Image (cartoon, rainbow, N blue to C red):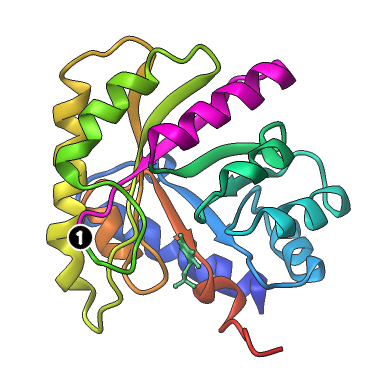
Amino acid sequence: MVAENLEQVRKNIKESCRKVNRDPAEVTLISVSKTKPVSMLQEAYDAGSRDFGENKVQEIMDKYPQLPSDIRWHMIGHLQRNKVKYIVDKVALIHSVDSLRLAETIEQEAAKHQVTVSVLIEVNVAQEESKFGLKTEEVLSLVESVAAFPHIHIEGLMTIAPYVEDPEENRAIFRQLKKLSVDIAAKNINNVSMSVLSMGMTGDYQVAVQEGATMVRVGTGIFGERNYAR
Ligand SMILES: *Cc1c(COP(=O)(O)O)cnc(C)c1O
């Protein structure tokens, strides 16, 4: 089932790209595998997936040694500072940097491990109370501060859009994140790239791709519903 689902999601991404004249190669599909067993990740791997998204440090640490080493792990959940040290040398990209304090910790741990960590700044575009992420107007100043850190490279922005019945309701959110990334890119800040836009989940990735997403994070659409009550 995982392989068929992946194929369907890839087809949908291609179709969305075709509608707006984008090259599908610009869009990375991240298989969001949180709560799912290693056997299902292996299925997705065998069907060609190399990018996996997890939202818990412990889960990345459990799964990391059990799966092939060419997997790119994406930390997409809220990251506590005291856990940074466990994943700083394991993840390809941290999508959820939302404070200077967290960035400072990542910088310290990256320096210790002698690695450079790629990160995205998480933006709470919709300003939902329940969500992490900076307000749109706070992003530039954090980007400017983090740009000075030698062991962190900002690659772009990430947002988690609200849960909606009709994905069209999130189009304006995706547009705002795209606009913010274009505005920041225009400032040509040293050590800062705005090439990645991580936005869109199972319910709305097709709209996100139409609005410029370069990474979509799809869980349910690939692995099925999650059961948190186990
Ligand atoms: C769980 C999660 C996803 C995937 O959600 P689905 O609706 O299952 O596709 C994407 N992004 C983040 C940050 C998540 O926590």
- Residue in the foreground of this view, choosing between 228 and 111: 111
Q: Residue at x 25, y 84 (%)?
A: 165
The image shows residue 115 at horizontal and vertical percentages of 66, 19
Q: Residue at x 16, y 20 (%)?
A: 186
- Residue in the foreground of this view, choosing between 174 and 107: 107
Is the residue 194 above or below the residue 53 in the image?
A: above
Instruction: Give, as a three-letter code, the residue at label 1.
Output: Gln
- Residue in the foreground of this view, choosing between 198 and 136: 136
Snapshot quadrant of residue 138: top left
Is the residue 86 above or below the residue 144 in the image?
A: below
The image shows residue 50 at horizontal and vertical percentages of 66, 47
The image shows residue 47 at horizontal and vertical percentages of 69, 60
The image shows residue 87 at horizontal and vertical percentages of 69, 40
| Crowd rating for badge 1 (residues with CA inside 10 Å; few <14, some 14–19, many 20+) | some
Residue that badge 1 annotates: 127
**Left or right of residue 148, residue 22 in this image:** left
Of helix, strand and loop, which one carries label 1? Answer: loop
Q: Which residues are magenta?
A: 99-126
Which quadrant, please, contains the C terminus?
A: bottom right
Q: Residue at x 58, y 81 (%)?
A: 224
Which quadrant, please, contains the N terminus?
A: bottom right
Q: Is residue 19 magenta?
A: no
**Left or right of residue 87, residue 186 in this image:** left
